[in-house]
Image (cartoon, grey):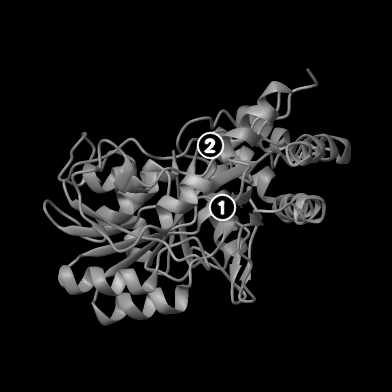
Amino acid sequence: MGKQILLVSPHMSEEGFEQDFVKEAFDSNWITSLGKNVDEFEKEFALKTESKHAAALITGTAAIHLALKAAGVEKDDIVFCQSLTFSATANPIIYQNATPVFIDSDLKTWNMCPLALEKAFERYPHAKAVIVVHLYGLSTDMDEIVKICKEHNAVLIEDAAESLGSYYKGKHTGTFGDYGVFSFNGNKIITTSGGGMLVSQDKGKIEKVRFWSTQSKDEARHYQHSEIGFNYRMSNILAGIGRGQLKVLDRRVAKKKYIFEFYKKELSNLQGLEFMPENSWNEPNFWLTCIQLNGKIKPIDIMEALEKDNIEARPIWKPMHLQPFFKKYDHIAGTVAESLFENGVCLPSDTKMTDEDLKRICLIIKGLWE
């Protein structure tokens, strides 16, 4: 068995930027949920993504939750949510006691299908919000989605947890909707070990999110709370890691693209194997390189073959409408998401991999076709 290769793992900067910012936090004794690193990380992140305002939070899930709250989503409101995603996209809808309705994907993007979204609005014309996902760094067809949401007066939330560094028609994903959500979980393209960011053009909404995320403490000498609060603010230590990671984001995107192109060159000629879609208007960050299998070789064959040599690969996300908890909720149109799940594999995409690692992976995969 060869050395372990993970699907994806944290990759700190070679220069030690993160340690410098964390040391600064320790030296100043600002290690809690307030401090210079938090303030600067928000400013630097907003500048990097060309957003107006940003709030640093403990997770991307917390960011979705507070985006829904800021959008006025309440008990029994309908929220349209992309079905092909990780459960963290959908769970906050339940936190707000709202009702999710799951929307199928489009093959050309793997993300929310505009036609399915139109059908959803025909069935639920008063839906309050829409959550789209830029899956695996592939951008949704945002022109169509934005247009539909505006026509129906629905709040648009972009789950860009997997797409930091991706662009749609030259503009950062996560900046088209009313709110954009990013994740810095350990497996993301940059990490703070755990953390998230909510961005918006609306300064007042972001200020309100910061208020809610620090337990909704009113301006009073004593502890007073006129609204429900949450302990969702990012710590100054984690924000320091984020500031350092942000400095190498472009470098990480370049390596992710290199990994995708390496696989594509080596594996494209294998019968029944197709790569994730590429569109002229999309500049993905290639967070994970994903494939579809439509021949004699099945996803489990690849995953088990790699596993035998200590290499991690995983299935495509299982759609939400197939999940035991969410089965009772409505699902609009088609079986695209199901097909992508059943036939998909996420290949190792760790930015610390060498060419030798990539050759080893490809050799094992090609061996299945011999």
| Residue at figure coordinates x 18%, y 52% from the top left | 99
Q: Quadrant of residue 361?
A: top right
Q: Residues within 10 Å of mark 1 (few under 14, many from 20)?
A: many
Q: Depth check: 110 or 46 in front?
A: 110
Q: Which residue is mark 2?
A: 236
Q: Is residue 58 above or below residue 283?
A: above
Is 189 on the left or on the right of 68, as rendered? Answer: right
Q: Is residue 12 above or below residue 163?
A: above
**Image coordinates for residue 355, horizontal then vertical, percent:** 87, 41
Residue extending farthest left: 76
**Image coordinates for residue 26, horizontal then vertical, percent:** 62, 27
The label number, if any, that marks residue 319 in the structure image: none
Q: Residues within 10 Å of mark 2 (few under 14, many from 20)?
A: many
For marks 1 and 2, give the CA distance: 28 Å
Q: Quadrant of residue 282?
A: bottom right
Residue at disc 1, secondary structure: helix
Residue 205 visible = yes
Q: Which residue is mark 1?
A: 136
Q: Earlier in the sequence, mark 1 or mark 2?
A: 1
Q: Is residue 161 above or below residue 307?
A: below
Identify the amino acid type marked 1.
Answer: Tyr
Identify the amino acid type marked 2.
Answer: Asn
Is 309 on the left or on the right of 274, as rendered? Answer: right
Q: Depth check: 163 or 323 in front?
A: 323
**Image coordinates for residue 286, horizontal then vertical, percent:** 66, 54
Placement of the N terminus among the 4 image quadrants = top right
**Image coordinates for residue 158, horizontal then vertical, percent:** 42, 61
| Residue at figure coordinates x 45%, y 79% from the top left | 143
Which-is-in-front pick, marks 1 and 2?
1
Q: Quadrant of residue 308?
A: top right
| Residue at figure coordinates x 27%, y 35% from the top left | 324
